[in-house]
Image (cartoon, helix red, strand yellow):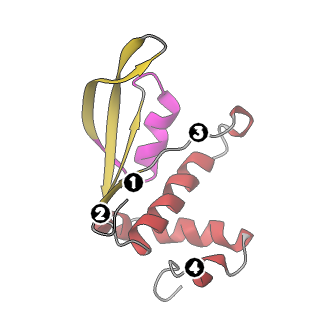
Amino acid sequence: MTATSTAATIGFAPHPGEWGKGLGTETVHLLCALGFRAPGLHRIRAARSPFNEASARTLPRAGMTEDGRIRDHVFVRGAWRDSITYSILEHEWRSIEGWASVRRWTPQIPGWGKKHGWWPPGG
């Protein structure tokens, strides 16, 4: 990301032993907090495989909107694969529970958010 970037791409891959615990949604919220607060991004995007049903639930649950499909987006295991893309805009994220999620997660690392300058105003 350059100093003039206004968008970023995020990704996550939880260990299979951690699936189903809500960590994907929490991870997306935290990455959005880092992106929207510190660098001042306008848009954050993510992509998933059309076959990844867990991410199909996680990304919208985290407030992201499905944008569409990129045909033949990635070359995996000898074949081109499509990707389903999602995004969230800064004002959308601030209007949902984004800050609330970060507040739930951050106490596990006392003072970390305030120390690094992305804690929400009034938080």
- Kind of element beneath mark 4: loop
Decide whether residue 117 is among the magenta residues. no
Q: Is residue 18 above or below residue 40?
A: above
According to the picture, the residue beneath numbered tag 2 turns out to be 5
Q: Is residue 112 left or right of residue 123?
A: right
User: Residue visible at 53% across and 80% down?
Assistant: 119
Amino acid at pointer 4: His
According to the picture, the residue beneath numbered tag 4 turns out to be 116
Q: Residue 63, labelled with which disc? A: 1
- Kind of element beneath mark 3: loop
Q: CA distance from mark 1 to mark 4?
A: 24 Å
Task: Assess disc 4: are there few (<14), some (14-19) or many (≥20) residues with their C-alpha within 10 Å of its C-alpha.
Answer: few
Magenta-tinted stretch: 50-66
Residue 35, quarter of picture: bottom left
Decide whether residue 51 is among the magenta residues. yes
Q: Mark 4 or mark 2, which has the lower sequence index?
A: 2
Amino acid at pointer 3: Ala
Q: CA distance from mark 1 to mark 2?
A: 22 Å
Amino acid at pointer 1: Gly
Give whichever of 119, 80 is nearer the camera: 80
Q: CA distance from mark 4 to mark 3?
A: 24 Å
Q: Nearer the viewer, mark 3 or mark 2?
A: 2
Give whichever of 28, 40 is nearer the camera: 40
According to the picture, the residue beneath numbered tag 3 turns out to be 13
Furthest-top residue in view?
78
Q: Mark 1 or mark 3, which has the lower sequence index?
A: 3
- Kind of element beneath mark 1: loop
Horizontal and vertical percent for residue 105? 64, 66
Asked if residue 82 can be seen in this view, the reply is yes
Q: Nearer the viewer, mark 1 or mark 4?
A: 4
